[in-house]
Amino acid sequence: MTDRKAELAANLAQVEERISAACAAVGRKRDDVTLIVVTKTYPASDVRLLYELGVRQVAENRDQDAAPKAAACADLADLRWHFVGQLQTNKVRSVVTYSDLVQSVDRDRLVTALSAAAVKAEREVGCLIQVALDAESGARGDRGGIAPDGIEQLAGLVADAPGLRLDGLMTVAPLAGEYADRQRAAFERLMDLSTDLRRAHPAANMVSAGMSADLEEAVAAGATHVRVGTAVLGVRPRLG
């Protein structure tokens, strides 16, 4: 085993222990929570090592990094790619060629572009509505996402769009507003919004919340997926 593979294996084991302990603390089954490893700024070689260690779901936030990395790992047939960054419509055609799920859907125009690109690529792309818990009614958050009162309309648009599948909700713990430094409360609010969404869209039961620093709070609140980068891959190098 190479030094890098050993490092990743040790980090994965620690994250696995954290998730397992968080599940046990609230009476959840470990299988209820899926780990997505965020591989942004790290090379395709790390993705391949993670795959060898059992990881099957990875995430990226920039198409210019993700597209060549996905191409380099195209032989890993059961590896699922998530797109988690703010997505510009001019990148959509590329993103749908490799992403199985886009977690950052937050506006009508993006839904229209994703649908057209998915149909052209003859693919079905899963979508999560990104919720900005610090956004005012009708506005978008500083880091993307729509205010909670926009979920119903946007979800309906996704559900009706050819080539797209409405899978649920995603959020990033807000840095400002009433939920600043209150990750557990923020994630519990997202779970309430998920309950509301599933009344109209029962299959949209995915809740993506929690990262390296706050995955325990997300698991405690009920998240189905956590997005972990630094705790698995280490401190990311600066982009030069």
Image: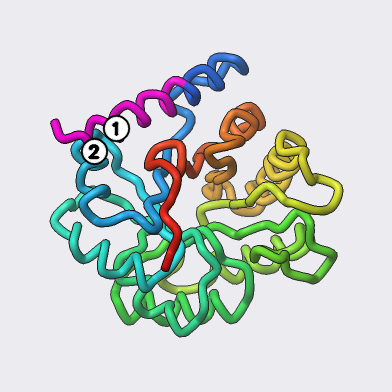
Residue 13 screen position, x and y as percent = 36, 24
Magenta-highlighted residues: 1-17
Marking on residue 44: none
Q: Looking at the figure, which quarter contains the N terminus?
A: top left
Q: Residues within 10 Å of mark 1 (few under 14, many from 20)?
A: some
Marking on residue 4: 2
Residue 197 screen position, x and y as percent = 67, 51
Asked whether, in this view, residue 102 is left or right of residue 41, the answer is right
Q: Looking at the figure, which quarter contains the C terminus?
A: bottom left
Q: Please name whichever residue, 16 or 163, is drawn nearer the observer in this view of the structure.
A: 16
Asked whether, in this view, residue 18 is left or right of residue 130, the answer is left
Magenta stretch prevailing secondary structure: helix
Asked whether, in this view, residue 85 is left or right of residue 73, the answer is right
Residue type (three-letter) at the residue carrying disc 2: Arg
Residue type (three-letter) at the residue carrying disc 1: Glu
Name the secondary structure under disc 2.
helix
Residue 48 screen position, x and y as percent = 20, 47
Residue 229 screen position, x and y as percent = 44, 45
Query: Which residue is located at x 42 percent, y 43 percent?
Result: 36
Decide whether residue 4 is among the magenta residues. Answer: yes
Vertical position of residue 232 compared to residue 80: above or below:
above
Query: Which residue is located at x 29 percent, y 74 percent?
Result: 122
Q: Which residue is mark 1?
A: 7
Vertical position of residue 12 compared to residue 78: above or below:
above
Do callouts 1 and 2 mark residues in contact (Cβ within 8 Å)?
Answer: yes
Query: Which residue is located at x 46 percent, y 84 percent?
Result: 90
Asked whether, in this view, residue 62 is left or right of residue 174, the answer is left
Name the secondary structure under disc 1.
helix
